[in-house]
Amino acid sequence: MTRFLLRRLLWFVITMFVVMSVSFVLMRSVPGGPFDQDRNVEPAIELNLKRKYHLDWPMWKQFLHYVGPLNLDERGMFGEGDRKGEKTFGGVLSGDFGPSFRYRDFTVNDIIGQSLPISALLGVIAMMWALSLGISTGIASALRRGTGLDLAMRLAATGGIALPNFVIAGFLIICFVFLIPLFPVAGWGSIRTMILPGFCLGLVFAAYISRLTRTGMLEALSQEHIRTAHAKGLSPRTVVMRHALKGGLLPVVSYLGPATAGILTGSLVIERIFFIPGTGSHFVNSANNRDYTLAMGVTILYTVLVYSLNLVVDLIYTLLDPRIALEDE
Amino acid sequence: MSSPTKQAKTRWDLGGGDLDRLLEEAKASRGESLWNDSWRRLKRNRPALWSLYFLAAFALISVLAPLLPLRSPVVVNTSLGAQSPAFAWGDGQYLEDVPLEEEITDRHLQDTYWDLSFMDKALVHLRVGIFGRWQTGHWLGTDHLGRDLLSRLVWGSRTSILVALAAALCSLLIGVIYGAFSGLAGGRIDNLMMRIVDVLYSIPFIFVVIFLITLISDNRALLEDKLGLDREKVFYLVIGAIYWLTMARVVRGQVLSLKNSEFIEASRVMGASTTRILFQHIVPNVLSIVVVYLTLTIPSVMLFEAFLSFLGLGIEPPKVSWGTVAADAATAINPLRIFWWMIVFLSLAMGSALLALNILGDGLRDALDPRMRGKD
C-alpha cells in the first residue's frame, strides 16, 4: 500500500513537472508577451509592467520564481516581504498562482477562489444526476433484459453518448425554459438555476454509467452466489440490492475517475451556455484574453484535481474488490 | 487396463477408411483470410451494415458538396433573418452578383465560399454547368444571419469529416509507430515508453490543448511564414497528438501478445523469415484492432472538434463546421423567438453520423476481434 502510494506520488511529481515546464516554456516563448493588446502603452510603462511581472528576467529565473517556493523577488527570499506586511508572490508550490495578467486587481488565487466553489457545486450536481440516472436505468435494463424497456434505454444511452452536451443543452433550454418555463435561462444562485445545467453536464456520463451498470449487473446476476441467494428464498429485491449490486457496480467505480475529468471538461461548455461564473468559463476567457497565468493556474489546478481523484478512485476500487492488489499495477 | 487398448483399437479402426476421408475433407476446405471472415461476419450484423451504407452516402454528399445546387453557406443576408424551414423549390439566384455573360472567377468564389481548393473550384464550375443558376430553397430554414442551414450543415460536415480523418490519421501514424516499436523492443525501453504514455494520460489534455491553440493563434503569422502551417493544420496535429495515446497502448499490447504467441513461434520453427512473420502474421493481426480503434476515434475527434469550434477555438469563420453551427444556434437562443430548426437539424445530422460511426465501430470490433472468431 505504502509502496503503491509512494510510486503514485513520484509519478505525480513527474507529471506536474512536465505540465508546468512545458506550458511555462510555451507561454513565455510567445513574442511580445501578454501586454501586446494594449496598443497605447508607452514604452516606459510597458517596461514597468514587465518589471512588475518579472518578464525581463531570464527564463530559468522566471520558472524558478513561478514554481517557488523560493522567492526570488527583490523584496527578499522566503517570504521576507510577508513579515514586512506586503504580499509577495510565493510560487505554485506554496499554493500561489501569481497575479492575473488581465484582471489587474486580482490574483489568480482570488479568481479561482471565487469561481471554484461554483464549478465544484455544478460538478457535484452533475455527478449526482449521472449516478442516479445511470445506475437506475442500468439496473432496470439489466433486469428487463431483451424487453422494449431495455432497448429504449440502450438507445437513449447511445444517443446520449453520440450527441455533444451543447446540442443537448440547446434542446433542453428550448423545451424547459421557453416552451415549458420551468427553469430560468441562465445565472447561478438558487437551486432552480442549478438543476438544468447539472443535468446537461451529467447526461453524457449517465449514459456511460448506464451502459457499464447494465453489463456489470448482467455479469453479476449470472453468477453462482446469486443463484444460491435466490435458492435460499431471499426476495428478488434483496438479491439485486444486497448481492448483485455490489459486484455489478465495480465497473462504474473504475469509471468515476475518467468521468470526473470529463465533467471538468464539459463544464467549460456548460458554464458558457448558462452564463455560470465558474472556473471553466474563466478558463475559456483567459485563453481568449491571453491571460497566461490564469490559464496556467487553472490547468495546473485541474491536473492536480484529476490526478488525486483518480488516486482516490483506485483506492476505493481496491477496497471494494479485494481480488485486485495495488502492487500489481 | 483394458480401456486404453480398447480406445487405441477403436481409433485405429476409425483410421482405416475414415482417416482418408478426414484428410480429403481437410484438403477440400480452404482457409479463409481474416478479412473475408470479418466481412462475412459484418454483413450479418444488420445495424452495422446499414451504418456503413449510411456513412458512405454521407461521405459522398459531403465530398460532392460543391457540386450540389446549394446556396452559399457564407453570404450573410440580415434582411432575411431567421427563416423557418419551408419547402420552396428554389430559384435561379446563385451568384446573382455575377452577370450572366461573365465568367465565374476565383474572386466570386472567394466571396461565396472561402479559399477553395483546386478540386472544389472545378466542382463548382461543373455545378454551374449542370444546374446553371438554379439553387435550392431554404429547405431547412436559415440561421439568424440569413444563411442557409442546409448548405451550412453540408459544408460543415465536410470540415468535420476532414478534421476527424486528418486527426485520426495523425493519431494512427504516431500511435502505431510508437506502440509497435515499444512492443517489439520490449524490456526496459518498452517500460520507459509506456510510463511516458502514462504520464501524458494523466494530464487533462483539453486544457493543455486550449492553451496551445491560444498560443498558436497568437503566433499564427510567424508559423504560417516559416512552416506553412495554418491554424487548421496545427489543429489536426494537436488533436492527433492527443489521440495517439490509446492507439499506442492498444497496438503495443497486441504486438506484445502476438510476439509471444504460439503460431508465431510455429512459423519461426518452420523457417519463416522475420520479414515474412512481420508482414504475414503480425501486421494483419495488428491492423484489425487498429481499424476498430480508428472507427471509434473518429467520432470522438468529431465531437472534440465541435467542442473546440463551439468555444471559438477551432475552425474559424468564414469556414463552417458543425461546431460553429452549434455555436451560432446557441447564441441565437432567445425567449422572443425560438429558432428550433437551428438546433434540431444540427443534432439530427450530428447525432445520426456519430451514432452510425459508433455502431459501425462496435460492429467492426465484433467482426474483427480474433477472440470472437468461430463463436457465432
Image (tube, grey):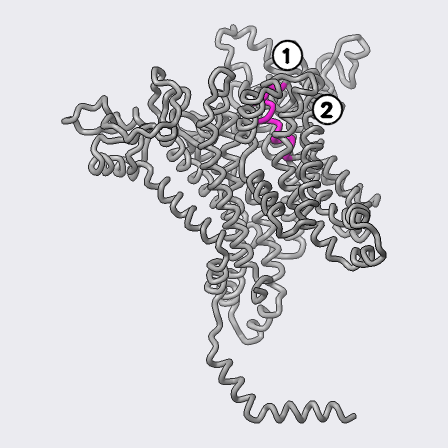
Picture quadrant where residue A255 is located: top right
On screen, residue A172 versus residue B83, left or right, reads: right
Disc 1: which residue: A52
Query: What's drawn in magenta, residue-wise?
Result: A262-276
Question: What is the x, y in percent for residue A144?
Answer: 67, 49
On screen, residue B77 versus residue B235, left or right, reads: left
Question: What is the x, y in percent for residue B214?
Answer: 52, 25
Picture quadrant where residue A187 is located: top right
Question: Alpha carbon of mark 2 to alpha carbon of mark 1: how far?
Answer: 17 Å
Residue A269 belongs to the span the image colors magenta: yes
Amino acid type, residue under disc 1 in the picture: Lys
Q: For the stretch drawn in magenta, what is the main secondary structure?
A: helix
Residue A120 appears in the picture as rendered:
yes
Question: What is the x, y in percent for residue A275?
Answer: 59, 19
On screen, residue B246 versus residue B170, left or right, reads: right
Disc 2: which residue: A68
Amino acid type, residue under disc 2 in the picture: Gly
Which chain letter matches label 2? A
Which chain letter matches label 1? A
Both marks 2 and 1 on one chain: yes
Q: Earlier in the sequence, mark 2 or mark 1?
A: 1
Farthest residue, direction left:
B101
Quadrant in which the N terminus of chain B appears = bottom right
Residue A177 belongs to the span the image colors magenta: no
Question: What is the x, y in percent for residue A214?
Answer: 67, 48
Residue at image coords 59%, 44%: A152
* SS at circle 2: loop
